[in-house]
Image (cartoon, rainbow, N blue to C red):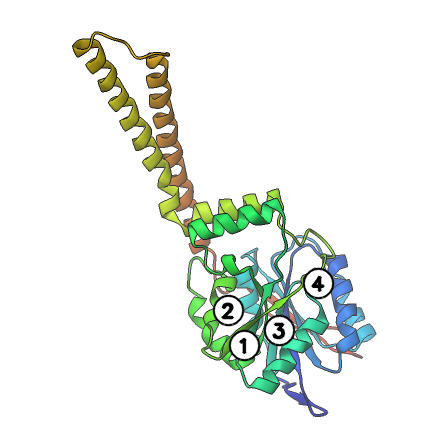
Amino acid sequence: MARLYFYSGGIFLISIVVCVFNEGETTTLFVREAARFKSEIGEIILVDDGSPGELPDMQALASETGLKIKVLTLQNNVGKDRATLIGLSHAECEFTALMDIDQQFSFEDMLCLKNSLTETGDDIVHVLKEEYFSIWNLLFRLFSFLTRVKGYEKNISDFAVARSGILKQSLERYNLSPIFSLKGALPGISSRSRSVRVKIRERISGNSKMDFTRLLDVFTATYLLAFPNIVRLSFVWAFAFFIFAVGYSLWICYQKIFLNSTPPGYPSEIIIEMIGFSFVFFFIGILSEYLNALVKQLIVKKPHALVRKLQEFLPGSSSGEGNG
C-alpha cells in the first residue's frame, strides 16, 4: 500500500522529480542541499536514465539527510523528457517540482513557486530563464524566431512546480508521442498556469548559458527532428542554384547570338559553380531526409515500460525496498 505524504505539520509537502545520468557526485550534492529544506520536501524521486555508472549509496544519504528517496532505474536511456514523465508517475505528494540535478535553479526558488501556488490556487507555475546578452544568445533568439521553436523564443525552462494530479493527467497524453518536448508542453497544461522569470545560477556541472556547442546541439536537434520543412530547405537551395545556372546560361547565349557580345568576367566558371552548388545541396537534402527518418524511427522504437528497478530509501532503514 502506497504511503501518502501530502500534508505534514500544516505544510503541503512536495515531490521533487529529477533525472540523473552518470552524475554520482552531483547527485550527492543535490540531496545534501535538499536536506536544508526537508521540512517541506516529502520525497525526492531520482530517475536513473540508463546510466552505466553507479549512483552513490542512497541509503546512507537518506539516513544522513533525513529525506525519503526513491530511485527508479531505467532499462536504457530514453532522454530527459520521457524519463521525467516516468518519475512523475511515482510522485505521491500534493505538489510536484521538476528540477535539474545541476542546481541551476535553487531550492529557494522551488519553494517560492510552491508557496505561490498555494496562495493563488493556480495549477502550475513554470519558469522563464532571465534574459542575458551574448552573441550566441542573440543567434539563438534569431534561430528561434525564424524556425518558430515552441517556447524557445521566451527562453522557457523545464523547471516548474505543479499540483501533482493535474500534472499527471495533462502529461499522460504525451506517453506515446514519438517526439516529446517538456518545455513545449508545460505552458499548455492548464488554463490556470502562469510563468515567472527566474535568474539562473551557474550549474554545478556544465554551462548554464548559451554557447557555440549548445547552439549547435539545438540547431541539430531542431533540424533533424522537429522541422522537416527545414530539412527540405536544402532541396529549395539546390533548385534555386540550378535555375540560376540555367537562366544565366540562357542569358549568355542570348547576348552571344543576338547581341554578338560576351558578359565580362568568367561566365563559364560561374555556371559550373552554380551547378556544383545545386548538386551539393541536393545530396545534403537526401542525406538530411534519411537522417530525419532514421532518428525518428530510433525514438519511436524506444520501449515505454522502462523501469528495471524501483527502490525506496527511508531515513533509519537498513536497506532499500526493491520492486521490479
Secondary structure state at the residue bearing disc 3: strand
Q: Which residue is mark 1?
A: 124
Query: What's the distance in space between the residues labelled 3 and 2, CA to CA?
Result: 12 Å
> Which quarter of the figure has residue 157?
bottom right
Q: For the view shown, which residue lies furthest in the top direction?
A: 260
- Residue 204 is left or right of residue 166, and the answer is right
Asked if the residue under mark 4 is in contact with the one under mark 3, i.e. CB atoms within 8 Å, the reply is no
Q: Earlier in the sequence, mark 4 or mark 2?
A: 4
Q: Which residue is mark 3?
A: 97
- Residue 54 is left or right of residue 47, and the answer is right
Q: Which residue is mark 4?
A: 103
* Residue drawn where x is 71% and y is 56% of the image: 23
Disc 2 crowd, CA 10 A, few/some/many (<14, 14-19, 20+): many
The amino acid type of the residue labelled 3 equals Ala
- Residue 91: x and y in percent read 59, 77
Q: Earlier in the sequence, mark 4 or mark 1?
A: 4
Secondary structure state at the residue bearing disc 4: loop
The amino acid type of the residue labelled 4 equals Gln
* Residue drawn where x is 67% and y is 61% of the image: 200
- Residue 151: x and y in percent read 49, 61
Tell me the tag on residue 186.
2
Query: What's the distance in space between the residues labelled 1 and 3, CA to CA?
Result: 10 Å
* Residue drawn where x is 72% and y is 54% of the image: 205
Question: Nearer the viewer's eye, disc 3 or disc 2?
Answer: 2
Query: What's the distance in space between the residues labelled 4 and 2, CA to CA?
Result: 20 Å
The amino acid type of the residue labelled 2 equals Leu
Secondary structure state at the residue bearing disc 1: strand
Asked if the residue under mark 1 is in contact with the one under mark 2, i.e. CB atoms within 8 Å, the reply is yes
Seen in the picture, residue 101 relative to 53 is either above or below; the reply is: below
